[in-house]
Amino acid sequence: MRAVITVIGKDMVGILAAVATKCADCGVNVQEVTQSVLDDMFAMIMLVDISSINVGFAEFADMLEKLGSERNLMIKAMHEDIFNAMHTV
């Protein structure tokens, strides 16, 4: 099982490290990352493997949102099943 994590906000040192650390703490493996900085705005999409997650997915998503609030970022996690359903016509 996989999930997609998106991060948007003002660029600052340590965003990728903070999100990756939270993933590792929860048994979530980062598989792919793409990120861009446009002027002073940071945007990142991560594809993560949640097969070995050690907390509930909703709790994990809440933890990421809290991390985002603490750093003035918008961080969202979406389960692959929901992501696929949204993009199926």
Image: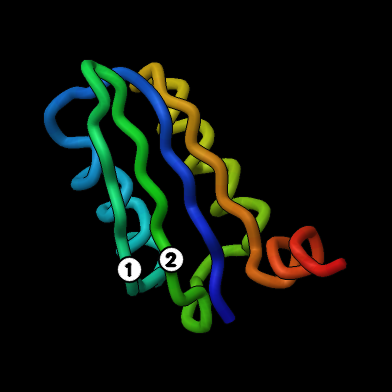
Q: Residue furthest front?
A: 89
Secondary structure under the numbered disc 1 in the rendered image: strand
> How is the structure coloured here?
rainbow
Left or right position of 22 against 17: right
Spot occupied by residue 40 in the image (x, y as percentages of width and height): 23, 16
The quadrant in which residue 44 appears is top left
Left or right position of 78 against 69: right
Between residues 59 and 86, which one lies in front from this camera angle?
A: 86
- Quadrant (top left, top right, bottom left, bottom right) of the N terminus: bottom right
Q: Name the amino acid, label 1.
A: Glu
Secondary structure under the numbered disc 2 in the rendered image: strand
Q: Are marks 2 and 1 in contact (CB under 8 Å)?
A: yes
Q: How many marks?
A: 2
The quadrant in which residue 81 appears is bottom right
Left or right position of 30 against 17: right
| Number of other residues with Cα within 10 Å of mark 2, as a class: few under 14, some 14 to 19, many 20 or more | some
Q: Residue at x 28, y 46 (%)?
A: 35
Residue 6: mark in rendering: none
Spot occupied by residue 79 in the image (x, y as percentages of width and height): 65, 64
Residue 40, compared with residue 49, is above or below; it is: above
| Number of other residues with Cα within 10 Å of mark 1, as a class: few under 14, some 14 to 19, many 20 or more | few
Residues at marks 2 and 1, CA–CA distance in whole angstroms: 5 Å
Q: Residue at x 23, y 23 (%)?
A: 11
Spot occupied by residue 59 in the image (x, y as percentages of width and height): 61, 51
Left or right position of 83 against 8: right
Residue pointed to by mark 2: 47
Residue pointed to by mark 1: 32
Q: Residue furthest right?
A: 89
Q: Residue at x 33, y 74 (%)?
A: 31
Q: Name the amino acid, label 2.
A: Leu
